[in-house]
Amino acid sequence: MRTMLFLCILSLLFPFSREKPTHYESHNITMDVVGMSCEDAVRVLSEAGYHVVHTAYITGQAPK
């Protein structure tokens, strides 16, 4: 059994721009989080410039 973390995130097109953002992109990311807590995964993405708006754990057998 593997545990996956499904993340719906919003990231700025220009995350380092000082101007007020006018457009957002929505991304769905599935991460293998074996050995990683939800908080750690959110922190890693936040440091990469993403804004996490929703998280959900999905457990199930990994495809072979």
Image (cartoon, helix red, strand yellow):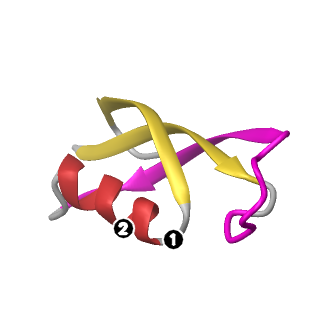
- Residue 8 horizontal side relative to residue 4, left or right: right
Find residue 18 and report its image quarter. bottom right
Mark 1, other Cα within 10 Å: few <14 / some 14–19 / many ≥20? few
List the residue tagged with mark 1: 48
- Residue 3 horizontal side relative to residue 56, left or right: left
Find residue 50 and report its image quarter. bottom right
Magenta residues? 15-34
Q: Give the image location of residue 40, x and y in percent.
A: 22, 61
Q: Is disc 2 in contact with disc 1, using a CB cutoff of under 8 Å?
A: yes
16 in magenta:
yes
Find residue 32 and report its image quarter. bottom left
Between 46 and 58, which is closer to the camera in this rendering? 46
Q: Give the image location of residue 4, x and y in percent.
A: 34, 44
Mark 2, other Cα within 10 Å: few <14 / some 14–19 / many ≥20? few
Q: Quadrant of the N terminus?
A: top left
Q: Disc 1 on helix, strand or loop?
A: loop
Residue at the spot x=68%, y=71% of the render? Answer: 16
Q: Disc 2 on helix, strand or loop?
A: helix
In the rendered image of this protein, does residue 49 appear above or below residue 22?
A: below
- Residue 13 horizontal side relative to residue 63, left or right: right
Q: What label does residue 44 carry, if any?
A: 2
* Amino acid type of the residue tagged 1 in the rendering: Ala
What whole-number distance in Å separates the C-alpha atoms at marks 2 and 1?
6 Å
17 in magenta:
yes
In the rendered image of this protein, does residue 22 appear above or below residue 18?
A: above
* Amino acid type of the residue tagged 2 in the rendering: Val
Between 11 and 1, which is closer to the camera in this rendering? 11
- Residue 36 horizontal side relative to residue 60, left or right: left
